[in-house]
Amino acid sequence: MTRLWNDPADFADEMIDGFVAANARSVRRVTGGVVRATQSPAGQVAVVIGGGSGHYPAFGGLVGPGLAHGAAMGNLFASPSTQQVFAVAKAADNGGGVFFSYGNYAGDVLNFDAAQERLRAEGVACETVTVTDDIFSASPAEKQKRRGIAGDLTVFRTAAAAAEAGYDLAGVTAVAAKANARTRSIGVAFTGCTLPGADHALFSVPEGRMAVGLGIHGEPGVDETDIPTADGLAELLVSRLLDERPEGAGTRVVPILNGLGSLKYEEMFVVYRRIAQLLETAGLEIVDPHVGEYCTSFDMAGTSLTLFWLDEELERLWDTPVDTPAYRRGSVAPQQRSEASDAVADVVEIVPGDDASRASAITVAAALEVLVRTIDDNVDELGRLDSIAGDGDHGIGMQRGAHAALAAATAAVAAGAGAGTTLERAADAWSDRAGGTSGALWGVILTSLAAKLGDAGSPSPLDVAAGVAAGASGVMDYGKAEVGDKTMVDALVPFSSALSSAVDAGASLTDAWRTAAARATTAAAATADLLPRMGRARTHGHHSVGIPDPGAHSLALIVTAIGETLAASKEN
Ligand code: ADP
Ligand code: MG
């Protein structure tokens, strides 16, 4: 249960404001998240971490000397947008390149990679290591697909220590990759979490039962058992992790027993007592054990055990002092405060479109209004579909994005923008505010459409069809999903090809759009039979058989509603 909030939609922003107010000694607010409030030497590699909010101390609580230089902080359980990651990295950069590390989730990968490309295009060297410690999220043969959970800490901390020791970007990357390869975690949960303002838990575990392998966003577990004794749990956690010792593992390990939000320290100590006995019996030397909260999941009751298998270099880096809001080790020498202020994003003036394009811009804004209404009316259903194999945020993510897009489009229209610029502003606002995978992808769709519509003349039906086609190929380029992978691509591609063929055959935009929308609806419904191969839902694909893909379903709802509005306006 979460009890305290103002407007739930403002929760993440207000949480960050309060976090910064309480920790101004350590962190400074910048667009997209926080950076250190203290100076770093020129030329030092900047370690930038991040992810959705709701996992404190991950990620903002881990910014400071000895740990990250900056954290991109997304909305609750939603990856930060590309713009956010980019802005934080720019603010954190010391001229020595940027090293990104975060848990391996589809939305985070999409947005961090896009930000990385943007930085590279500006000449900033960047490298990335995603954390993949959760051994229950994919088999050993598919290690690179595993999610990141509390093991994040070992990778962030050793990478940052390497940066502070003067390693260059390649050196920091090598340390982080080695730390990740030597970090393994498993988690269990007893109850799900309830997001602010929600009237029920995002996911649940039956009373008296324990979900094994449940993800930190409630991605369903791999097994369910009766709740064992504390010792029984210790035995389960340790035995599973010892079964998967990394290659080259020595005998020195750091155990991290992480609480997910509402498990008590006292309970964890009882469990840890047995964990320590078992590790010693197995002939291991325990180094610097951690029992506490390092990566939470709101008020979820659960715990995870991480084993970090040291070598000489990793142990040396692990031992360096750290001083961040939520994590302190040893003593850090006094630091000089940074005088920098957040570079305010350039406000680009709107160049007015011609009369015809301004008239089309009004239609664009009207279509976005229909889109917003469609999402508002279906927000719970979209969340429910996404909670079956995903993380339950598709409704609220689409809602945030769509509302921001409409507001940006309305402002653009008022400033005299043409259709292209109006859509471009909407696209940017959508991906920035929505975060997550679908937010980034809707940004791609609208940006592609914007480029084909332009700011001069009224777009022809052929232009619209070409814009949608560019959106479909953009989504596939960006997200790497193909038809049949159970994603929004399964509705978007048939929609686009039906639109193009109808328009090519001479149909009016309204008729072509409605025909295409009907195809999208059928195709979205047919995704129920598919097994997901992309995105968050991949790990727990079997849960979603019989249920349509949420992103395909929302796309079909949107194009259908827009088609009906086009038809209604033609009749008037
Ligand atoms: P997140 O997955 O980050 O929580 P959402 O819940 O808003 O984001 O959106 C989930 C939807 O995003 C999925 O139902 C699917 O349609 C779409 N999606 C996920 N990954 C991809 C991808 N790689 N390519 C295309 N669409 C994707
Ligand atoms: Mg989701």
Image (cartoon, rainbow, N blue to C red):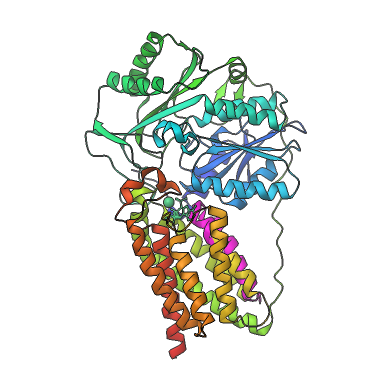
Which secondary structure type mostly characterizes the magenta part of the structure? helix
- Can you give x and y, in whole percent of width and height, for residue 411 in the image? 60, 71
- Can you give x and y, in whole percent of width and height, for residue 343 in the image? 71, 49
Which residue shows up at 54% across the image and 59% down it?
Answer: 475
Question: Does the magenta portion include 433?
Answer: yes
37 above or below 115?
above
Quadrant (top left, top right, bottom left, bottom right) of the C terminus: bottom left
Q: Is residue 168 left or right of residue 422?
A: right
Question: Does the magenta portion include 133?
Answer: no
Which residues are the magenta region? Answer: 414-442
Name the residue nearer the viewer: 513 or 77. 513
Residue 430 visible somewhere in the drawing: no
Q: What is the quadrant of residue 170 in the picture?
A: top right
544 above or below 134?
below
**Identity of the residue furthest to the bottom in this view:** 572
- Can you give x and y, in whole percent of width and height, for residue 384 in the image? 33, 55
Which residue shows up at 49% across the image and 75% down it?
Answer: 499
Quadrant (top left, top right, bottom left, bottom right) of the N terminus: top left
Name the residue nearer the viewer: 98 or 266. 98
Q: What is the quadrant of residue 555 in the picture?
A: bottom left
Q: Is residue 533 left or right of residue 44?
A: left
- Can you give x and y, in whole percent of width and height, for residue 515 in the image? 42, 78
351 above or below 460?
above
Which residue shows up at 50% across the image and 40% down it?
Answer: 104
